[in-house]
Amino acid sequence: MSIYAPQTAEARARRTRTGRILAVTALLVGAAVVGPQAFASDGPVEPVAIDVYTVGTGETLWDIAASLTPAGDDVRDTMLDIQHLNAMADTALMAGEQLYLPVE
């Protein structure tokens, strides 16, 4: 024996509304759990002292980084620091461009 419930428009609308409420609730709970982790950092970051430098004609990022790099350190690390500090996608420079340089 089976029970048959008529499929009225009101019953379908109630099920649809309930489904939407459950879906939105699930999304909000998921965002509350995952959201803070997306913005979390490893810990407090110390501020970096910077200096502003204007690029001269014919200068390269390597030249600038080499003049800042202490003896015995790798110039490539200094280049990466400069690129990160200035949000540079590559090492291309233009004369007159201003760069932020880390002060050591």
Image (cartoon, rainbow, N blue to C red):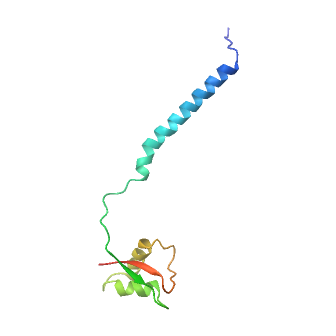
Residue 42, quarter of the rendered image: bottom left
- Residue 102 % position (x, y): 35, 77
Q: How many marks?
A: 0
Residue 15, quarter of the rendered image: top right
Q: Quadrant of the N terminus?
A: top right
Please give the name of the residue rendered at 70% of the width and 21% of the height, measured from the top-left corner. 9
Name, please, the residue furthest toward the top. Answer: 1
Residue 77, quarter of the rendered image: bottom left
* Left or right position of 16 against 35: right
Please give the name of the residue rendered at 41% of the width and 53% of the height, measured from the top-left corner. 39
Please give the name of the residue rendered at 31% of the width and 67% of the height, measured from the top-left corner. 47
- Residue 56 % position (x, y): 46, 89
**Residue 102 drawn above or below residue 63:** above
Name, please, the residue furthest toward the bottom. Answer: 58
- Residue 31 % position (x, y): 47, 43
Q: Quadrant of the C terminus?
A: bottom left
Please give the name of the residue rendered at 49% of the width and 79% of the height, measured from the top-left corner. 91
* Left or right position of 30 against 103: right
- Residue 99 % position (x, y): 43, 79
**Residue 36 drawn above or below residue 76:** above
